[in-house]
Amino acid sequence: MNAASDGAAAPVAQRGAGGFGLVLRGGLVLVALLLLVDTGRWLAMAWSALHYAYDLDYGEGIVWQQMRNIVAGTGYGPLGTYPAIVYHYPPVYHLTTAAMAGLFGLDQLIAGRLVSLLSTVASMALIALLIRSAISRSETRFARAAAAAIGALSLPAFPAIITWSMVMRVDMLGCALTLAGLALSVRAITRPALVPAAALVFVLAIYTKQTNIAAPLAALVGLWFVRPKSAFVLLGCCAALGLSALAMLVVASDGGFLRHILLYNINRLDLSQWRWLVGALLLQALLLAIAAVAMVHAWRRLTDAQAETLRARVAQDDSLAALLMLMLFAAVNAALLPLTLKSGASDNYLIIWSCGIAIFVGLGALPIVRAAERGVAPPSPLLLALLVLAPLMATYVPSPRDIDPGEKQRLAAVVARIAASPRPVISDDMVLLIRAGRPVEYEPAIAAELAHGNLYDEAGFARMVRRGDFGFFLTRGDRGSALYDTRYNRRVADAIDAAYPRKEMVGNLVVHLPAR
């Protein structure tokens, strides 16, 4: 009787498993379609950005001017009352963009955006490689490839990635180099000869944006745990290359490089930023939930009490060593989140964090892929639901396609007006100045920030404003708005009101004109 019951139960279980397999396969197809839709929408937005001649972000104009000055050999120069230009970052992105523009005959702004877009695509490919490296070789080729694809395609679902992938800013190139260094470090677990290459790429990442330290730290600790000799080689190569580059930049700039990177580029602590940070993380809530599940499984895999010590296990299984390095990467990224609690911080500080989460989204999808492939019940129906819902939560970021068609004509008229001015013009939209053939010689936000630390002669600039040394001012917002008040401290705002009392609106720009 029992035997008969057992025999009858087996086909029922198989039929149930087969049903689960069908549902899971359908769910995975839906996930893939939704991720492809998100990716297609992002690429369409990025394509429109490559055909838009004006600024999409406040920082594009100043980065463009920094690039021009660095190429001309005048970068990282002394900070005067006017001109007053600060160089926030090392020169790798600027030089890469200049090379792209020169080699292909591109407009420099468009070249900068193209570097960011290509860097994002490269980051997606590197995320796929990192996911595959951390999956056990006992998994099927399809399971490893599917999990890697899901993780890579989840990247355009992160708001920070959508925004920063289409602007002329340093962040996405730094991100791609960071991930490339991490991928080389993972490969160096079994091929130690790759350690110097990983060090070179890490140094390039840091000389793109100096806060790109999460991956080098994770690689250093991970390699020390698995191959101590390789860790010391990585540290030595990074130190030698980094210090050599620093010496060259300091000599070439007469010490200006260190002044700009260390002294002028320090923002005040702003604990009110925690509200923004919480809001930004809530936009990633579903993706974070998937990643959290994956991290729990990863931790259990790494700390299996039934096996040998972790050091012995990772030495025998390169996928475990890779997983350890990726867990360290995520941990360091989390530890660096407080960097967002400073004035002027934006969600570009969440770019590399988002890449770390995307890696674990891919690893989190693996149990569902495995169950679908084998036709067995999923480990958690909730996990499949999260995978389906996460792409639906992708935030829509306004792009040039959403700009009023008449805006280009209005901005072209402003460019002509700037070009015709007999005196310099100060503009929040600094791209307009370069389009008008004028250099950017004053960045409002950093000047206001430095004035709080007594590092900038704000009183001298206010005197210039009151004398009417400038043709006019172009601001986003007006006095009393949060944006305006962070860029123009009271002393400068009073001077603008006194010397440039007439106002006109051009789109979202306020034109401050002198009295007749």
Image (tube, grey):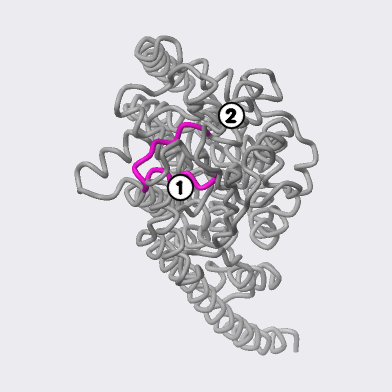
Residue drawn at (42%, 55%) of the image? 54
Considering only vertical position in the picture, is 492 above or below 176? above
Mark 2 is surrounded, within 10 Å at the Cα level, by few (under 14), some (14 to 19) or many (20 or more) other residues, namely few
What x and y, as percent, mark residue 418?
A: 43, 47
In the rendered structure, find residue 344 and report the number of the disc placed on it.
Answer: none
- Element type at mark 1: helix
The amino acid on which the numbered mark 1 sits, given as a three-letter code, is Leu
Magenta stretch: dominant SS? loop
| Residue 318 shows in the view | no
Front in this rendered view, residue 20 or 393: 393
Say which mark, if any, is on residue 467.
2
Residue tagged by mark 1?
130
Q: Is residue 258 magenta?
A: no
Pick whichever, 233 or 137, lies toward us.
233
Which quadrant holds residue 217? top right
Q: Comparing marks 2 and 1, which lies closer to the viewer?
A: 2
The magenta stretch spans residue 437: yes
Quarter of the image where one finds residue 268:
top right
